[in-house]
């Protein structure tokens, strides 16, 4: 099976998870972080899911699945421990053309969730096409020491500069050599080693972008 990689903007979009166990919880946490409007249908929730419901971060329908529960969703998950129920959810998704991940049946699913390494807006995802989720997780663990919080700060800084250039400059700002110059610098290393002055010098030299390492917190010794 060859999966197609995609990163989705789910801000404000309706997502439905059927099931409220350990696997549903893993999916729900990331969906809430992504700003999805989340509904979880399940007679029982794990503690952390119940907390998210109490905080108003998801809507809990405290009952078993009923056909019709997926109405209006852009994305859906069949995450119960009852294969027959998961299959019914898949059927509804098919009928309504809603993308579905059945967590016990990769071959019946439209998509799968990868293992994730996240540092701010930097997102590194690993998948094995369902062959070995545990290997995917292990690869993320191997990458973790290489991509620390300095990457979050570097990406934020680069994003600020880029946004300023694109909003303030007219014409073909997308081709500005500043972008290539910035990319060629090893900003993450400068940030990790606390070389704030070097970063500020570079930013000043690179134009009147107005960005400073301070404006995005780059180069702080103790990033929070
Ligand atoms: C990466 C991760 C992301 C996440 O879930 O967030 C993820 N599974 C994780 C963990 C994990 N999964 C399993 C175990 C138990 C150990 C074991 O059995 O190996 C553990 C470990 C644990 O739970 O700790 C078993 C398992 N998983 C699936 C099946 C069904 C099947 O294969 O038939 C079964 C057998 C169930 C059974 O037999 O009962 C199916 C899927 N799991 C996927 C993703 C998708 C494919 C991703 C890919 O590899 O491309 C896919 C297809 C669908 C989906 O879930 O989207 C997450 C990493 C943890 C993390 O990052 O923290
Ligand atoms: N994809 C993955 O990463 C992965 C990992 C481990 C296991 N699994 C598979 O996923 C299934 C779920 O795993 P889990 O650890 O979350 O199980 P779990 O037992 O912790 O949770 C099952 C949940 O389903 C709910 N449920 C049961 N019947 C329901 C119904 N009719 N309507 C609505 N909700 C219902 C239960 O209330 C419970 O909240 C497992 O059976 C296994 O096959 C998938």
Image (cartoon, grey):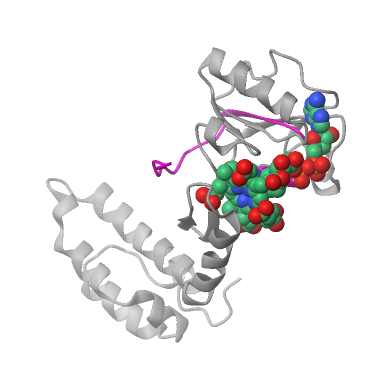
On the question of residue 29 being in view, the answer is no
Q: Name the residue rendered at 68%, 20% in the picture.
A: 88
Coordinates of residue 154 in the picture (x, y in percent):
41, 68
> Height in image: 204 above or below 30?
below
Answer with left or right where residue 27 lies relative to residue 53. Answer: left
On the question of residue 214 being in view, the answer is yes
Q: Which residues are magenta?
A: 1-27
Coordinates of residue 223 in the picture (x, y in percent):
57, 74
Which part of the image, by quadrant, shows the N terminus? top left
Answer with left or right where residue 50 lies relative to residue 204. Answer: right
Q: Is residue 4 magenta?
A: yes
Which part of the image, by quadrant, shows the C terminus? bottom right
Coordinates of residue 50 in the picture (x, y in percent):
84, 41
Answer with left or right where residue 154 lies relative to residue 60. Answer: left
Q: Nearer the viewer, residue 125 or 103?
A: 103
Name the quadrant containing residue 191. Answer: bottom left
């Amino acid at each position: 099976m060859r999966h197609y990689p995609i990163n989705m903007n789910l801000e404000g979009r309706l997502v439905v998870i059927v099931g409220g166990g350990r696997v549903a919880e893993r999916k729900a946490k990331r969906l809430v972080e992504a700003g999805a409007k989340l509904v979880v249908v399940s007679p029982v929730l794990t503690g952390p899911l119940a907390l998210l419901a109490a905080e108003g971060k998801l809507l809990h329908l405290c009952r078993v699945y009923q056909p019709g529960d997926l109405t209006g969703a852009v994305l859906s998950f069949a995450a119960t421990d009852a294969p027959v129920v998961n299959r019914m959810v898949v059927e509804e998704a098919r009928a309504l053309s809603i993308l579905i991940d059945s967590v016990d049946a990769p071959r019946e699913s439209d998509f799968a969730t990868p293992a994730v390494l996240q540092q701010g807006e930097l997102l590194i995802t690993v998948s094995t096409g369902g062959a070995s989720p545990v290997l995917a997780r292990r690869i993320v663990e191997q990458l973790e020491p290489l991509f620390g919080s300095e990457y979050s700060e570097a990406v934020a800084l680069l994003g600020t500069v880029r946004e300023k250039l694109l909003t303030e400059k007219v014409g073909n700002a997308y081709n500005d050599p500043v972008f290539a110059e910035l990319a060629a610098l090893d900003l993450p290393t400068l940030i990790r080693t606390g070389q704030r002055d070097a970063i500020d010098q570079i930013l000043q030299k690179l134009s009147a972008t107005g960005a400073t390492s301070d404006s995005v917190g780059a180069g702080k010794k103790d990033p929070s």
